[in-house]
Amino acid sequence: MTPTTPTIILAGATGHLGGLIAEELRKRGAHVRALVRVGTEAGKRSALQALGAEVVEVDFQNAQALTQACQGGTCVVSALSGLRDVIVDTQTQLLKAAVAAGVPRFIPSDFSIDFTKLTPGHNRNLDFRLEFKAILDKAPIQATSILNGMFTDLLTGQAPMVLFPIKRVMYYGNANQLLDFTTIANTAAYTAAAALDPTTPRYLRIAGDVLSVHGLVQAASAATGEKFKPLRVGGLGVLNALITVTKMLAPGKGEVFPAWQGMQYMRDMFAGKVKLEPLDNARYPEIKWTTVQQVLAARKG
């Protein structure tokens, strides 16, 4: 490492997104200091070390130790995932440490639709991000949030919009509403580029693909060679009622992504208020954006 090599402090590097961010940062020549919780399993530590990252075990509740771990950083990137204790409490500890260590920039774990357009009490996981936003905006540090819509990867698993067995694309409300999708890999690459760019604004908005339900139908049909059709389940009121019932029957206490949380996310996307605009895709022209069709075509099974 030379004196001019930027040092990026990365929290949440043992997760999928965080690991890919670490990899992308190393590709770009950055020194990555991955902060992991005390007791993190050896396999996860060694995977990061194999990338060339410096791995530091730290107690995130120990302000002095966390500040020391942030010393010399040019940017702190958070890819932490969890509920309020993580997104608000732990990130606040990390933010305080970054400020105390004199780190000039902070990228929070926002990675979502445009939650800044929502009112509190509307979407649980995004409420946590709104709460942390209020704290971050008061801190004496340059902050940049990266908003990427929905992870495209979820369309082949956790997000039941593209129903492969019956060849339908399920939706609520307006089939013409445009939706933002970005792969986890594209999000990681963009985040790495932003972490090394000292001129970033407060928000960067990206979408690897922007499609309506009709566009999703075309993408699924082209990806599989089979004819898909739209399937309207009902209006947004129906989805709201379904969310209420699901929270009662399957509350998912302590889960980061219970079924009803995904429904809240889908509802907000179909409502249109959280649409990302303008997009900042062109800021880092070396990034090649992956389309929904490419993701659907690559699915297994």
Image: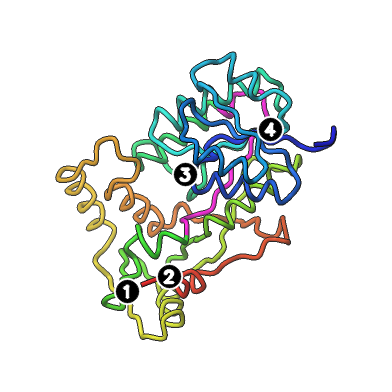
**Residue 150 colored in magenta in the image:** yes
Q: Are marks 2 and 1 in contact (CB under 8 Å)?
A: yes
Q: Earlier in the sequence, mark 3 or mark 2?
A: 3
Residue 56 vertical placement versus 5 (above, below) = above
The residue beneath circle 4 is 105
Q: Three-letter amino acid code at disc 3?
A: Phe
Q: How far apart, in angstroms, are the residues tagged by discs 3 and 4?
A: 21 Å
Chain part drawn in magenta: 136-151
Q: Residue 195's x, y, as percent?
A: 68, 42
Describe the element under mark 3 as helix, strand or loop.
Answer: helix
Q: Three-letter amino acid code at disc 1?
A: Phe
In the image shown, does 27 or 181 lie closer to the viewer? 27
The residue beneath circle 3 is 115
The residue beneath circle 2 is 299
Q: Left or right: 143 with respect to 83?
A: right
Mark seen at residue 164: 1
Q: Left or right: 95 with respect to 4?
A: left
Crowding around mark 1 (Cα neighbors within 10 Å: few <14, some 14 to 19, many 20+) is: some
Q: Earlier in the sequence, mark 1 or mark 4?
A: 4
Residue at horizontal 24 percent and vertical 65 percent from the top = 234
Q: Earlier in the sequence, mark 2 or mark 4?
A: 4
Residue 173 vertical placement versus 187 (above, below) = below
Q: Residue 106's x, y, as percent?
A: 63, 33
